[in-house]
Amino acid sequence: MRIGELAKATGATPRALRHYEQAGLISCERAPNGYRIYDERAVVRVRNIRHLLAAGLTLDDVQVFLPCLDGEVAVAPPSDKGLRVALERLAVLNERIAAQTEARDRLAAALRHKTGGRIPPVA
């Protein structure tokens, strides 16, 4: 299937598919006219990549899951390495959330101070 067909089948954009290919997560053959040609297994692989990205992992994190991207990643038991990567990513996300929460609280306090306790409506 061509890149547009794979994009339609998976909900990914052609740009994202090229990015996954550049990252070594998917591969394709080239037609004589230069078009990318993917086999049917790419649909499962791309859906799994998108599932892992939606869970908060990065493309670098997804590299750890390469051996199981052609199966049912969502229901398979994680490997020790996969579990470690996911836990590390969770810690990073928790740190970012804490930093954003602190920034929000500081801004809200500054607004309350400047407005006499009233925070003006946000447009």
Image (cartoon, rainbow, N blue to C red):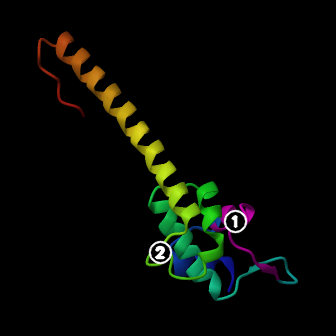
Magenta residues (range) = 17-30
Give neighbour class at mark 2: few <14, some 14-19, many 20+ (Cα, 10 Å).
few
Q: Is residue 75 left or right of residue 10?
A: left
Q: Quadrant of residue 80?
A: bottom right
Mark seen at residue 77: 2
Label at residue 35: none
Secondary structure under the numbered disc 1 in the rendered image: helix
Q: Residue lying farthest left?
A: 117
Please name the residue shown 58% across and 74% down the image.
46
Tell me where residue 41 sits by quadrant: bottom right
Please tell me which residue is depicted at 45% across the width and 75% down the height of the picture: 74
Circle 1: residue type: Arg
Q: Earlier in the sequence, mark 2 or mark 1?
A: 1
Q: Residue furthest front?
A: 80
How far from the left and from the top, in percent, is residue 52?
Answer: 50, 65
How far apart are labels 2 and 1 at the CA level? 29 Å
- Which sits in the foreground, 87 or 96? 87
Q: Is residue 46 left or right of residue 37?
A: left
Q: Secondary structure at mark 2?
A: loop
Residue 27 picture location, percent across and down? 74, 75
Type of residue at label 2?
A: Pro
Q: Eyeballing the image, is 34 above or below 25?
A: below
Can residue 103 be seen? yes
Please name whichever residue, 50 or 115, is drawn nearer the observer in this view of the structure. 50
Q: Nearer the viewer, residue 117 or 3?
A: 117
**Looking at the image, residue 48 lies above or below residue 99:** below
Q: Mark yes or no: residue 57 visible.
A: no
Residue 91's x, y, as percent? 45, 45
Q: Residue 18 got which mark? A: 1
